[in-house]
Amino acid sequence: MAKKPTVTLASMTGFGRAQVETSQLSVKVEFRTVNGKGFHCKLRMPSDLLEHEAKVEGMLRQALSRGSISGFVSVRRSHDDTVEFDQQVLKKYLAAWKRTEKNLGLDVVSPTLKDLISMPGAMHSARNPQGQFRAVERAIKQAAAEAIVALQDSRAKEGARLSKEILRIINQLEKQLARTARRAPVAVKEISAKYALRVQQALAAAGENNSYDLGRELITLAERADVQEEIARLGIHIERLRATIKKGGAVGRELEFVLQECHREITTLGNKSSDSRLSEMVVAMKLCAQQLKEQVANVE
């Protein structure tokens, strides 16, 4: 059984280049992309090629959803004045010929090449402006398509590296969360015992011995110090991060949203804890969250 293709994250960092050679032209196209919040494209090309800019940008928009893209298009023309046949025009004449024969009920007789090239527009000089425009347009389109394929391949390779690095940091975050989950109940007991002693001392100093007030204060303090809900929610967010990475593709915005939720839970956990060891773990988790944010910023 054939293996299913591995789906990786789509990075916004990449480079693609292609060159197309014809008897008339040499076209070179280069694209370079870096991370960006949306789609931003800046193309450089000679002024006489600017009418092709919108089509090239449209091809990029179809292939990419996010990233800051810079591109370069150059065309070098030959100066010979050879005569060429416009194959697109010849195909249209041939199709019209056959269609007319069918509509008129005539015997189907294919035209000869001599018949076709005698039709208006079938031949043009390499210096013919209209013919040159079509030739340049086709060559630019082909070169841009090949450069986009190379760019996507480059972004996929970078995405595979990103996936490994992000998963490595998630593993570190998960280890710190496991340590926090083990420490939290112990910390609550220690804090409760510490506060119980202080409350008893305060009541004794005031000449009171109200066990009800003591119990109520201890319950309130224990509830404030309890971080089990934050630990559980953070664990759920970590699993969602893994699932999103496994899904692959252009999931950068989704990863950014889940990371915001992770950061919120870590911050709340730190605010509720007065245990020094838990505070150290919270700092370690915040560092992991920051590293994840930096890496996810490169995901499309």
Image (tube, helix red, strand yellow):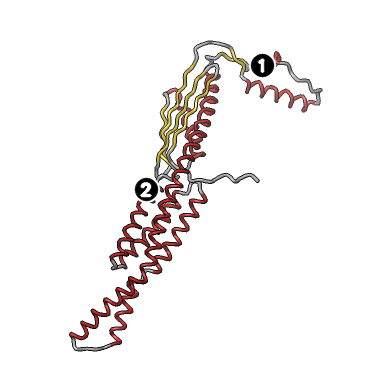
- The three-letter code of the residue at mark 1 reads Met
* Viewer-nearest residue: 175 or 36: 175
Of mark 2 and mark 1, the one earlier in the sequence is: 1
**In this rendering, is residue 109 above or below 258?**
above
The image shows residue 81 at horizontal and vertical percentages of 54, 10
The image shows residue 276 at horizontal and vertical percentages of 28, 65
**In this rendering, is residue 154 above or below 237?**
above
Residue located 29% across and 80% down the image: 217
* Viewer-nearest residue: 166 or 17: 166
- The three-letter code of the residue at mark 2 reads Glu
Residue located 53% across and 29% down the image: 141
Give the quadrant of residue 280: bottom left
Quadrant where the image shows the C terminus: top left
The image shows residue 49 at horizontal and vertical percentages of 46, 24
What secondary structure is marked by label 1? loop
- 199 left or right, relative to 115: left
The label nearer to you, 2 versus 1, is 2
Residue picked out by circle 2: 294
- 62 left or right, relative to 275: right
Give the quadrant of residue 259: bottom left
- Disc 2 versus disc 1: distance between alpha carbons? 63 Å
| Number of numbered discs overlaid on the protein picture | 2
* Residue 81: assigned label: none
The image shows residue 207 at horizontal and vertical percentages of 19, 89
Residue located 44% across and 58% down the image: 238
* Viewer-nearest residue: 191 or 115: 191
Residue picked out by circle 1: 119
**Neighbours of disc 2 within 10 Å: few (<14), some (14-19), many (20+):** few
**In this rendering, is residue 290 above or below 74?**
below
